[in-house]
Amino acid sequence: MTVAVVDMFSAEAEMAFVETLRRTGFAVLRNPPLDARRMLKMADDWRDFFYGEEKWEYLAEETPSGNTSGYIPPDVSETAVGHDRKDLKEFFHIVPDTILPAALADDAEAHLGEVQVLGRLLLGWLDIHMGSALGPGLRGQLAESLSPADSLLRILHYPPLTGDEPPGAVRAAAHEDINLITLLPVSSEPGLQVLGRDGQWTDVPGIPGDIIVNSGDMLQEASRRQLPSTSHRVINPPDADSNLSRISMPYFLAPDLDIQLSPQHTAGSYLRERLDLLAR
């Protein structure tokens, strides 16, 4: 499967984005309206944070919306649905009112503002071109449905490999995202792969400054599967690069949890169903 690179300066960007998302569940945006230098600086600054001891002062707490806010260490990290090994990662969740390290706060908040604006723009494109595929709860309302309180900026750190990892453990096992769409700056380190309909895994293209966009389970549900939520993973680096860490900064855009995705589900009931699976 080939994930298309869409130049946002192109007059055809809008249609090209919608088409590649409809066809593959993924798109790569070149020249997005985001500060590329800031994103590179954030990756370096957060890598330093994860290597330091200050992170233990920000252990995660649950928010009223059900999100978590703060630092999640490797020993309580995620296990993907259908897998029995924890992913090899640690991360920091940023939602409204998250207490951030002072040295990281300004850049994180500025980036969060930019990805929210970009997310609304892209959801607006889907409103225009895929509106007829959406259920009545979201038809023409995707952009307006975005809920910053229920969305999440996750700063991920995949540490260097030590050789002591459990057999079969990987940086991020194959999974689908639960939300509407995810906006992910291209990492300086490779590893992200997407599963094609032919059963083959393919590297997702892109260069630093690009933004990878993928549709999530909520959008798939709301569009009656016309916008697929495609499996993806982050593989371990080859032995020659096992000493390299990897930073990833996805923003998961979610709607208000009362929104009706389909006759069967609100966004909230859909989220609870996924959390129940993760808890098993």
Image (tube, rainbow, N blue to C red):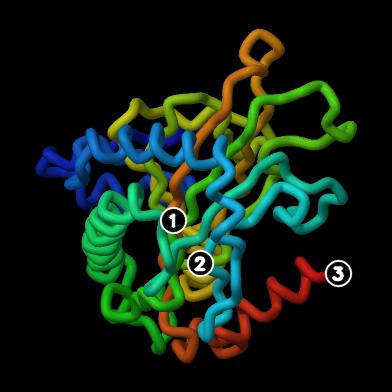
**Measuring 31% from the left and 35% from the top, which residue is drawn there?**
41
Residue situated furthest top in the rendering:
240
Q: Which residue is mark 2?
A: 179
Circle 3 Cα neighbour tier, 10 Å, few/some/many (<14 / 14–19 / ≥20):
few
Q: Position of residue 222 (x, y in %)?
A: 48, 75
The quarter in which the C terminus is drawn is bottom right
Which of the pair 121/223 is nearer the observer?
121
Secondary structure of the residue carrying numbered label 1: strand
Q: Which mark is residue 235?
A: none
* Contact check, label 2 and label 1, Cβ < 8 Å: yes
Secondary structure of the residue carrying numbered label 2: loop
The kind of residue on which mark 3 rests is Arg
Does residue 176 sit above or below 31 in this rendering? below
Is any atom of residue 129 visible in this view?
no
Between the C-alphas of marks 3 and 2, the distance is 20 Å
Is any atom of residue 163 visible in this view?
yes
Q: Which mark is residue 182?
A: 1
The kind of residue on which mark 2 rests is Asn
Secondary structure of the residue carrying numbered label 3: loop
Between the C-alphas of marks 3 and 1, the distance is 25 Å
Answer left or right for 136 relative to 41: right
**Measuring 24% from the left and 61% from the top, which residue is drawn there?**
113
Q: Which residue is mark 3?
A: 280
Q: Position of residue 152 (x, y in %)?
A: 45, 64
Answer left or right for 193 relative to 257: right
User: Which of the 4 image quarters holds residue 106?
Assistant: bottom left
